[in-house]
Amino acid sequence: MLDKELVEALKISTYPHESLQLILTKISDKKFDLSATDSKGNTYLHIACQYAPEPVVKLLINEMKNRKIKPEKGSDKTENLYAFSSFLKKGKRH
C-alpha cells in the first residue's frame, strides 16, 4: 500500500520546501518500501513520472537502482518505466 503523504507530495507540481523535504526523507529511508503499489499496480515511480519534475523522477530512479529494485517479471507497466528511465538518462525528456 502506498504512503498517502508521499503520493500527495509527489503530485504537487510546484514543490514548496516542506513537500520536497518529505520526498527526500521518505525515499532516502532504506526501510521505506519504494516498490509498494496501489490497487491499480502503480508505484511511487509511476506517480512521479505523471506529476513530479524530472529531478524528482531521477532521484527516485537512482534510489531504486541503489537498492537494486527491479521490475517484476511480466510487469509491462514497470518495465516501461525502466525504459523511460533510460530515455531520461539520454536527456530526451522535454
Image (cartoon, helix red, strand yellow):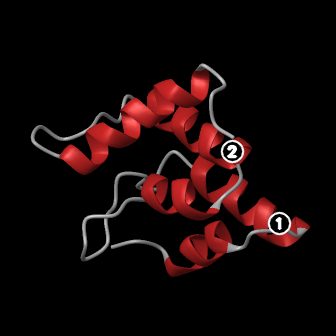
Q: Determine the residue positioned at 82% across, 66% down.
A: 15
Asked if residue 34 lies left or right of residue 21, the reply is left
Image quarter hosting the C terminus: top right
**Residue at image mark 1:** 15
At mark 1, the secondary structure is: loop
Q: Determine the residue positioned at 61% across, 64% down.
A: 51
Position in image of residue 63 (x %, y %): 55, 36
Position in image of residue 44 (x %, y %): 47, 59
Q: How packed is label 2: few (under 14 Cα within 10 Å), some, or many (20 or more)? A: some
**Residue at image mark 2:** 54
Q: Residue furthest top?
A: 90
Asked if residue 35 lies left or right of residue 31, the reply is left
Cα–Cα gap, marks 2 and 1: 12 Å
Relative to the observer, which residue lies in front, 48 or 9? 48
Task: Tell me if I can see residue 66 in this picture.
Answer: no
At mark 2, the secondary structure is: helix
Q: Is the Cβ of the residue at disc 2 closer than 8 Å to that at disc 1?
A: no
Quadrant location of residue 37? bottom left
Q: In the rendered image of this protein, does residue 31 appear above or below residue 38?
A: above
Task: Tell me if I can see residue 15 in this picture.
Answer: yes
Q: Determine the residue positioned at 66% across, 25% down.
A: 91
Q: Amino acid at mark 2?
A: Glu
Position in image of residue 17 (x %, y %): 89, 66
Quadrant location of residue 19? bottom right
Mark with earlier residue (2, 1): 1
Q: Amino acid at mark 1?
A: Tyr
Position in image of residue 74 (x %, y %): 10, 42
Relative to the observer, which residue lies in front, 4 or 85? 85
